[in-house]
Image (cartoon, coloured by chain):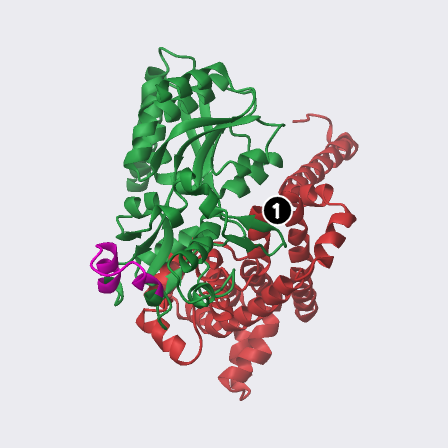
Chain colours: A green, B red
Amino acid sequence: MRTTRTAQATVMALAAVALGACGSTQHASASHTHETASVAYAGSLEYLNEHVIGPDFARATGDVYEGRGGGSFGLAHDIIAGEISPNVFESIGGAPIAELEPRFTRWYVTVASSPIVLAYNPHTSFAPRLAAIAAGRAPFTELFSLLRTPGFLLGRTNPATDPQGQAFYEMVELATVRYHLPASTTSAVLGSLENPSQVYSETSLEARLESGQLDAASAFRSQAIQLHLPYIALPAAIDFGDPADAATYATASLTLPDGSVVHGHALTLAVTTLGRHDQGAAMAFVDYVIDGAGREALAAGGYTLLRPTVTGTGVPHVVRTAVARADG
Amino acid sequence: MSFAPLSRAPTAREPLRIAQSALAVAGGLVAWVVLLGPLLTLLWHLGPHALVVALSAPDALGPAGTSLLASAVALVIVVAVGTPVALVIAERGGAVARILEASLLVVLLMPPLVIGLLLVFMVGPLTPIGGLLARVGLDATNTFTALVIAEVYEAAPYFVLAAAAAFAAADHDVVVQARLLGDSPWRAFWRAMVPEVAGELATALSIAWARAIGAFGAVIIVAYHPYGLPMQIWTTLNETGLPTALPYAVVLLVVALPFPLLAYARGRHARR
């Protein structure tokens, strides 16, 4: 008897929730056609998109927001294979979007950049020295001798699949040249490209750093801010966050396991629309990120805002207008 | 609902029965095709050419070897640790058995990803257990050991619960008789109980094997390296896309299938 009553209560509660959900959807879309901005985005945007930009966008426009995070190149490959069919793609760098051209899009807008930092756990034995470097109480170059200390647990992502993993590797190369560090620094700090004692999946990396199973790890500044982890900011010339330093970044390079050579480039946040369905919502979302509250949310979340720049052809009118507005 | 005279009943019902059983068979076949849908899609999308290309790539077979070896070690551990637990659950009954069973169900309910994250807290390099393991040369982070540990956690509950069900359903008189005839408990278990439940144990082993070799959620967290087949599929998907990743799924099937088939055949044989 009690079971039945509990079951009834559960069903009624579920029904109430469902009704509530329907109600709010109807309310939100009352003044608008209901379209869905289906956004595939670089994994580092997960928190901002799901908890700030997405919900705010839905409230502001009445459109539905639906997001999916992942590695930028992985997402591009999923789109090409027809595994997913988003109508907005936010990628780290333009290269993953370029892979979709000309079939899915022929343009993208660069809106911000995502500098890399070294995030650290505040409770491990190396934390005081890392904190001293972060605060400028110890010289920045001391970081690299600290990183090569035996027993220092450093984590990073896979350069073969992740732009941040590539940038972090190249950052050490750039620092070695810039600060006249010993030539062995890159190999001593990082080991091989896919060094098994340093390379983790992104999820694992965050979990290990937060649980104190790593002393420090590569991160985007936005991630360190979201996770409330202290971090060492890197000089612009080696943090891959300033397009003005593109020529410097390009001097670093690495050879991927498949034999291809990649050169360093600024880690910019590029956005475009894809496909033909729900283009209104897709355009509205891009507009929101280029010149709406989405732009402010990116800045607050740790991204460096850039003057929006268009690359490619056939840019929709709405996007052109938004770029011009943001510019003016 | 037929009201036909009794004498005509068999001829009137015969077509109905045939139709019913044909319908049942057709329904079963449809369900079978639906269940095998992903597998059929995989084979449909892959020509033999794609498979040959994938298999002839350098390092193509490394992950298959890693997967086979890690899963074999994991299965040995699962059986060694899981069998006593299964026996206790099956034979003790009462509160202890129920608690053991329920707690294993809880582990089973946890998404493998969560198990992986919790394993970081449990056996990470700076934890007491992680420190102990490192001292005996078994680092549990991104190593073969880590891969085995992740697989054990993903597979063990399946084996224990299936084996416990098998032991509970077995005819215990056989074991009792063996004991009366002077067999030691171990010998009685091995000679009387195991043949009695061989078929069900083979199924339990096959399920555990499949869970171990296909383990991914916990593996991607604790053992990003060395690549077994599931991680190989994942990184290849991210590196170069679906067409190059999918053939590894076939490799996984090819290397993973013989064991459960053998176990199944042996189980059937032993039961006779």
- Image location of residue A267, percent across then percent down: 44, 41
| Residue A2 found in image quarter | top left
Query: Of residues B145 and A259, which is closer to you in this image?
Result: A259
Residue A240 in magenta stretch = no
Quadrant containing the C terminus of chain B is bottom right
Residue flagged by tag 1: what amino acid is it? Thr
- Residue at 27% x, 51% y is A229
- Image location of residue B169, percent across then percent down: 52, 64
Query: Of residues B9 and B59, which is closer to you in this image?
Result: B59
Q: Which residues are magenta?
A: A128-144
* Residue lying furthest bottom: B182
- Residue at 46% x, 59% y is A199
Circle 1 sits on which residue? B240
In this rendering, the answer to whether A138 lies above or below A242 is below
- Image location of residue B268, percent across then percent down: 68, 65
- Image location of residue B92, percent across then percent down: 40, 70
